[in-house]
Amino acid sequence: EKRSDWRFLLQLASLCDSDLFRRERASFHPSAFATMATQGEEDTTVKEPLDLIRLSLDERIYVKLRGERELRGKLHAYDQHLNMILGEVEETITTVEIDDETYEEIIKTQKRHVQYLFVRGDGVILVSPPLRSS
């Protein structure tokens, strides 16, 4: 059954805040087993690319998508395909038009705010974690 109802997305996103889902989402990626083995100690080592995403859970990240779209939001969950659930999202869409008379580029940006957003991983170009001080 195909679910296109926005209520389903909100229910899915609300699962992100449950303790059960936090434990289960860690199992999406093999490196998370090392984290579970530390018994509560946070593993901050980066051994492979998705470890950087794991360290950004519950923090605001920047995501660049195909089609000149950019997202900034709080990362609630992800999987090995870079499917993500983001909360408190600001989406920026940039379009470039050519003026018919002057042939100059006209750059337009549109912004919108979304409470929760499911991002399909095949559209992701870049994920930037928050800046960290050493």
Image (cartoon, rainbow, N blue to C red):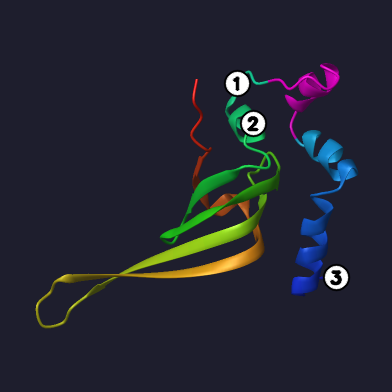
- The stretch drawn in magenta includes residue 36: yes
The answer to whether residue 125 is above or below residue 108 is: above
- Quarter location, residue 82: top right
Label 1 residue SS? loop
First-in-chain label (1 vs 3) = 3
Circle 2 residue = 55
Q: Secondary structure at mark 2?
A: loop
Residue in the foreground of this view, choosing between 110 and 88: 88
Whether tag 2 and tag 1 are in contact, CB under 8 A, the answer is yes
- Position of residue 68 in the picture relative to residue 32 (left or right): left
**Is residue 41 inside the magenta stretch?**
yes
In this image, 38 relative to 128: left or right?
right
Of all residues, the one furthest to the right in this rendering is 20
Alpha carbon distance from label 2 to label 1: 9 Å
Q: Residue at x 63, y 18 (%)?
A: 45
Identify the mark nearer the N-term, 3 or 2.
3
Q: Hey, which residue is sitting farthest bottom in the picture?
A: 101
Q: Give me the C-alpha separation between circle 1 and circle 3.
A: 39 Å
Q: Position of residue 50 (x, y in %)?
A: 62, 31
The picture quadrant where one finds residue 29 is top right
**Where's the N terminus, which quadrant?**
bottom right
Looking at the image, can residue 57 be seen? yes
Q: Is disc 1 in contact with disc 3, using a CB cutoff of under 8 Å?
A: no
Q: Secondary structure at mark 3?
A: loop
**Residue designated by label 1:** 46
In percent of width and height, residue 89 lies at 58, 59
Residue type pointed to by label 2? Leu
Q: Amino acid at mark 3?
A: Glu
Q: Which residue is mark 3?
A: 1
Q: Magenta residues?
A: 29-43
